[in-house]
Image (cartoon, rainbow, N blue to C red):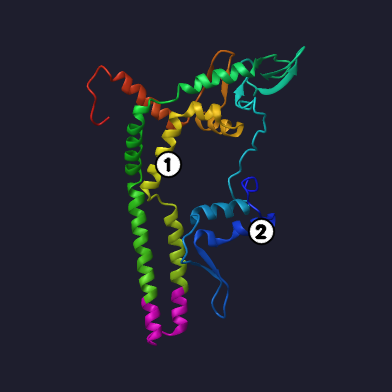
Amino acid sequence: MTLERGLKCSKHNFWLAIRNPVYCGKIFVAKFKDEDARLVPGQHEPLVSEELFQQVQDVLDGRGRIYRPKVQTLDEFPLRGFLICPRCGRILTGSRSKGRNNYYSYYHCIPQCGIRFKTQAANTEFVRELRKYVPRRAMVNVYGELIMEEFKDATYMSRQERNKVLKQIDVLNDKLNKARRKMLFEEVDPADFKLMKTDCEREINALERQVTQLPHDTKTIEGITKKGLSNLILLDQLYENGTVREKREIVGSIFPENLTFNGECYRTTRLNEAVRQIYLIEKELQENKKRHKQRKF
């Protein structure tokens, strides 16, 4: 993917790059005399968060999440692997068959079952189904406000915990600075200062890792929310104009479980939870048209 976007780099150098902690704002200090090797915060601005860097290291070390392999498919079969046979429950595949003059594309089950649907009809019907989940443009601001309000309520304790951890880091840094000054004025033995420094840095690193896992930046969440809702308004257009990979990402994000197509309409057992909540809100608003609107709602 990076080579396709213009990166000029060998596999070996790429491996070294994604192992380099400098990208998350850390600098490796080699062992010197009695001091052990360690990572220290750099003065430069990190390009990625420390949490993301650690996730990458976990993947490289074999501790990351195991993903199922991507289904390779042609442009005319964006739904291959997502459709369930209405007769036997197997996953439908897709292929072409040669007619008298042309090739024809079908989603189909195994020959013994005999179920098959023309891809053009199935793809067209799916776009029609997708349009059911495009919300009204006027509701976007309402959704955004509800999401941000719920996010702030849900993360209040976590944000309080984050502030508490940051204060602990400041206390340890002050403690380390005072010890350094005392050593300069020969009030503290260098050996004792070294032990104190090692202990403080260990605690600071542990607290910094803890901080990265706690929510704090509501502006970032607000930006992500606005982008997601703007994409939701253009959901059908993004699907129709997207690449086969983008189409499959949309299908997988909206429908966590496979769809059943009977030749006329689609059925699914479960929607993405965020999408489901949005349409529950819209449904309740439609039912509330003839009644007075509740300020709380």
Q: Tell me: 174 left or right of 85.
A: left
Q: Which residues are magenta?
A: 178-197
Check disc 1 and report the residue beneath it: 224
Task: Point out the image quarter for the N terminus.
Answer: top right
The amino acid beneath tag 2 is: Asn
Local crowd size for mark 2, using a 10 Å CA cut-off: few (<14), some (14–19), many (≥20): few
**Label 1 Cα neighbours within 10 Å, binned few <14 / some 14-19 / many ≥20:** few
Q: Quadrant of residue 246?
A: top right
Secondary structure at badge 1 equals helix
Report the front residue among 90 and 221: 221
Q: Nearer the viewer, residue 159 or 220?
A: 220
x and y percent of residue 27 in the render?
53, 66
List x then y, in percent, for residue 282. 36, 24
- Magenta stretch contains residue 226: no
When the figure is inspected, residue 195 is found, relative to residue 127, above or below; the finding is below
- What amino acid is labelled 1 in the image? Ile
Q: Position of residue 40 (x, y in %)?
A: 49, 68
Task: Report the disc number at residue 13.
Answer: 2
